[in-house]
Amino acid sequence: MTKKKYYFMSGLPRSGSTLLSTLLNQNPEIYSGPSSPVLGVMVGAHENFLTNELYLGYPKPDQANKVIGSVIENYYSDIEKPIIIDKNRAWTGRMPFIEGYIQPEELKVIIPVRRVDEILTSFLTMVHRNPFKEGQAKINYIDEVLIKSDTPMNDENRCMHLLNSGGILYDSLHTLKLGVEEGFRDCFHYVDYNDLMDDPQGEMDKIYNFLGEESFEHTFEGLSNQNREKDLEVYGLADMHKVHSVLKKTSPSPSTILPESIIDIVEQNRSTLEFWKESKVKAQPMISGKPETKTISYNLFSNK
């Protein structure tokens, strides 16, 4: 059996990752599924070995490394395609896990990004489209946080939650910046949502060039997400991962949706929030060069 080749997708929410996966799956050589639990399982196993007294009493480092490294192979054992793209927004903050445990021939991560005000607009549009109904199992996960913290449910507070620690947008930006600061910038390929909309085949060609894979001529009509997630049951937001049959922008202009206070905050902090626009033109990361040796090696279990 041919050994599978693994690449990764991380990046920002509401920035086209589901669309990218749908397009990549048109290629008979590639499987790109919904966000996977692979990283979480690897982290859990890693931490368990480090604290498990049974392991600490009789450590077997080589076997521990193999157990953690085998997670991705077992998770995708049912996929026959030779190229796997695993999606998880936290990969960029856990790059040494890929290096130490999965050990691909080349470490490459596709990073969908988008203007922050457009991301916030997309979130609010979904929330407005999914008002909570009596008998519904779950309220949307943004308002759920506001209710638990006794915060009024309005668009300004929704945006502030997303932009602060614990919000999915903040956390995604934080893990992406962490990967850049740790010296992995050259392993990232940014795909801007608007560029993908304006020149889809051109952007797909750039992805193939980055991966070092043969280009593929894609179709941009009759699109369908074959890996639909349980959006309403899990997130309280129906069709959160819906892909429109024809490639088109559907979100309204931020100026028609966002509160003025949020527009001001984004504009005042745009260069900080959208730091990748600065970093993607540089050969080296924003803060420091790639260290000669990683300060953390996640193939931690050694015989020393």
Image (tube, grey):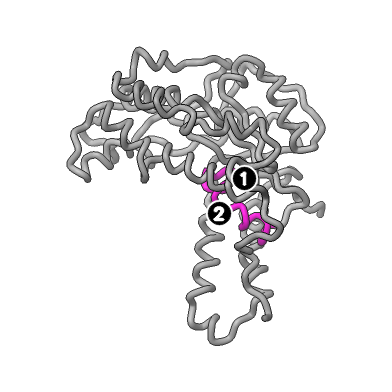
Q: What amino acid is found at the position of numbered circle 1 in the picture? A: Asp
Give how far across and how far down residue 116 sits, in percent.
45, 27
Start-end of magenta stretch: 86-102
Residue at 28% across, 42% down:
145
Comparing 78 with 114, the one in front is 114
Of the image marks 1 and 2, the number of the one nearer the N terminus: 2
Q: Classify mark 1: residues with Cα within 10 Å, few (<14), some (14-19) or many (20+).
A: many
Q: Classify mark 2: residues with Cα within 10 Å, few (<14), some (14-19) or many (20+).
A: many
Give how far across and how far down residue 4 sits, in percent.
75, 50
Q: Quadrant of residue 129?
A: top left
Give the quadrant of the C terminus.
bottom right
Give how far across and how far down residue 168 sits, in percent.
41, 40
Could you give the CA–CA distance between mark 1 and mark 2, rounded to whole angstroms? 9 Å
Find the residue positioned furthest to the front: 288
Q: Which residue is mark 2?
A: 39
Q: Report the magenta stretch's main SS.
A: helix
Q: Is residue 217 magenta?
A: no
Could you tell me which secondary element the residue under label 2 belongs to?
helix
Query: Do the numbered discs 1 and 2 sit on residues whose CB atoms are within 8 Å?
Result: yes
Q: How many marks?
A: 2
Could you tell me which secondary element the residue under label 1 belongs to?
strand
Q: Quadrant of residue 156?
A: top left
Residue at 54% across, 45% down:
88
Residue 86 numbered tag: 1
Q: Is residue 9 left or right of residue 202?
A: left
Q: What amino acid is found at the position of numbered circle 2 in the picture? A: Leu
Comparing 68 with 259, the one in front is 259
Q: In this view of the protein, can residue 241 be seen by the observer?
A: no
Give how far across and how far down residue 92 sits, in percent.
57, 46
